[in-house]
Amino acid sequence: MLAYILNLATLICINAVLAITLNFIMGYAGIFSIAHAIFFGVGAYTAAYVALHASASIFLVIPVAMLVAGALSLVLALPALRVRGEYFVAASLGLQVLGVTVFSEWKSVTGGLGGMIGIPPADIFGFAVTDPVQFLLLAICCLIPVLLITSVLLRSSFGRNLKAIRDSESAAHAFGKNVAIIKTMSVVISAMLAAVAGALYAFYMGFINVESFMLDTSVLLMAMVIIGGTGTLLGPIVGTVLLMLLPGIFSYMTFLPQTEIGSIQQIAYGLAMVLLMIYRPGGIVGSGKPRITKEKAA
Amino acid sequence: MLLLQLLINGVQVGALYALIAVGFSLIFGSTRIFHFAHGSAFTIAAYVFYDLVSIEQIHWLIAVLGASVAAVLFGLVLNRFVYVPIQKHEGSFFTVFVASFGVGIIVQNLCGMLFGRAFVAVNSPLSQSMELLPGLYVAPLSGIAIIIAVVFFVGLQLFLSRTHTGMAMRALSENPELVRAYGLSPRRLSMTVFALGSFLAVPAALLSAAGSGLNPAIGHHVMLISLAATIVGGVGSLRGAACAGVLLGLAENLSLAWFEPQWSEAITFIVLFLFILFRPSGFFGRVTAS
């Protein structure tokens, strides 16, 4: 039971990092990306590769993962600068499909569909983090800085610029703001912080394959942000906790056929997404109307 | 000969993609609802057809009717009980998208529970390939697919340009307020759009069930393709969506001559990505991307 709770808490921390970083571009910059799982994946694969081939020290692995994801995120920034709305969604969808293909086909680096196995435990100054309690502490120690960095950034002039761009790009432009650089920066920051979650995930599981970084993950992350409340600080965390606890409930219903548990969990996710969008589209923390930020929450 | 074979396969697959894309484009163009669950209408039609023909052993004509009714009902129920309530308070693009994606997940997993996750196919003598030229195999089904696609597309164009309802549908995409001012109900019109759009997924679903087979995840793939075709063709242009569907089918199959099959979906999306970067309005679309 304790092991189960620890596992769940660690996964909640990892997903919360992803939801917070996605909210950073979705809620504040108005960039609705459904390719977030790709940066999670890039972080995880880079971390696994570095840990297997060089060193498992988190002070090497996490910065390298962040750099690689940050560099690749420029590919996402490119369409974000040119188009909005459904066009950008389609572009990010394209990136998502492309990324999954690369993850599963670039066999020499990613191990193909089989993935990468035997990733060594995270190493902090020669101390290997193997105990679940210690790993949870490590995950929390990553979640808090991510939360701090994003909230400090959003309180700064950078955050105000982002919101200005989200609400009216031409108005921000008229005020002499460099829209292209601010948008690109927000995408790069979001991808770099998402890579931290990827590195944690790779260390925690000890095994990664493409299954964890598919379109479903991206949409689940998006659902976490929207259900929790887009453009609020607490929203993504609430959404993550809610959606991560949901499948656990079904594991206790012993009357359900065990072979179909996976499908039933998926159906419950789907149903939760549909019902919440109908009855609470602004999210649980939100004001009832999405994309309108409360002054206090920011 | 390999290239000719791939070209023929490409046109056949492209004809099916075109039909599905036109359905999605019709719905998205007139109601601005990002109907991601359009792929689910396809899956439902295909599985109902499979169930009636291969499991219940009912005559195929009745099965076609059953599949059509199922797909149209799905579209109508989804619009009435999911999209209309969401649009009542606010029609944010992403709210609709997430709800629609949720429906897709539900349908995929229900089909998996009911029919299993493996590939199934309806056995039909029409899918037996014949050797037309040495090394060139063509099944009667590919001819049928192309004819059906053309017939449906011409029929749809006539319906939209000649009938009163068709014209009202086009008006809905231009200006819903004006439609209301003319005493028509945008709500009833969007029901018709959903019925028609979902119905357009049926022929493609039946041909896939009889041809390449289906699994519960097929709707997902189909949806990605029709989304790509809608954007590449230009949002709001049915002609564009149809052409782009054929183009993507061709690209997917011709790429097999040089790449492994796992890359075919990625190639579709490279085409899409380039279009969005360099020509976001598509072939025929109005310039709407800002």
Image (cartoon, grey):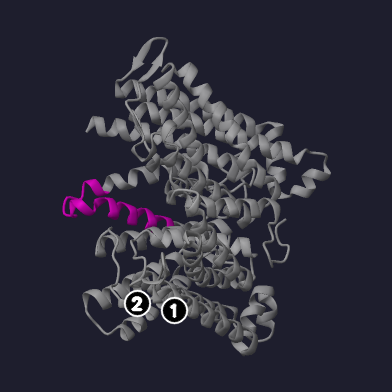
Q: Which residue is mark 2?
A: B126
Q: Residue furthest top?
A: A126
Which residues lie in the magenta part? A250-273
Which image quadrant is residue A78 in?
A: top right
Front residue of B289/A154: it is B289
Q: Which of the two discs, 1 and 2, labels the residue nearer the N terminus?
A: 2
Please report the residue visible at 44 percent of the width from the left and 28 percent of the height from the top.
A199
Mark 1, Cα crowd under 10 Å, few <14 / some 14-19 / many 20+, is some
Please give the name of the residue rendered at 46% of the width and 65% of the height, measured from the top-left corner: B9
Image location (x, y in percent) of residue A266: 33, 53
Chain on which label 1 sits: B
Q: In front: B61, or A242?
A: B61
Q: Position of residue A46 (x, y in %)?
A: 47, 28
Q: Quadrant of the C terminus of chain A?
A: top right
Q: Quadrant of the N terminus of chain A?
A: top left
Where is residue A213 drawn, in percent x and y? 43, 41
Residue ID for mark 1: B144
Q: Left or right: A112 with respect to B24? A: left
Q: CA distance from mark 1 to mark 2?
A: 9 Å
SS class, disc 1: helix
Which sits in the foreground, A5 or A36?
Answer: A36
* Mark 2 secondary-structure assignment: helix
Kind of residue at disc 1: Ile
Q: Is residue B247 left or right of residue A172?
A: left
- Give above or below for A55 relative to A46: above
The residue lying at 51 percent from left, 63 percent from top is B249
Residue A251 lies within the magenta run: yes
Q: Is residue A90 left or right of residue A6?
A: right
Q: Is residue A133 visible?
A: yes
A144 versus A26 height, above or below: above
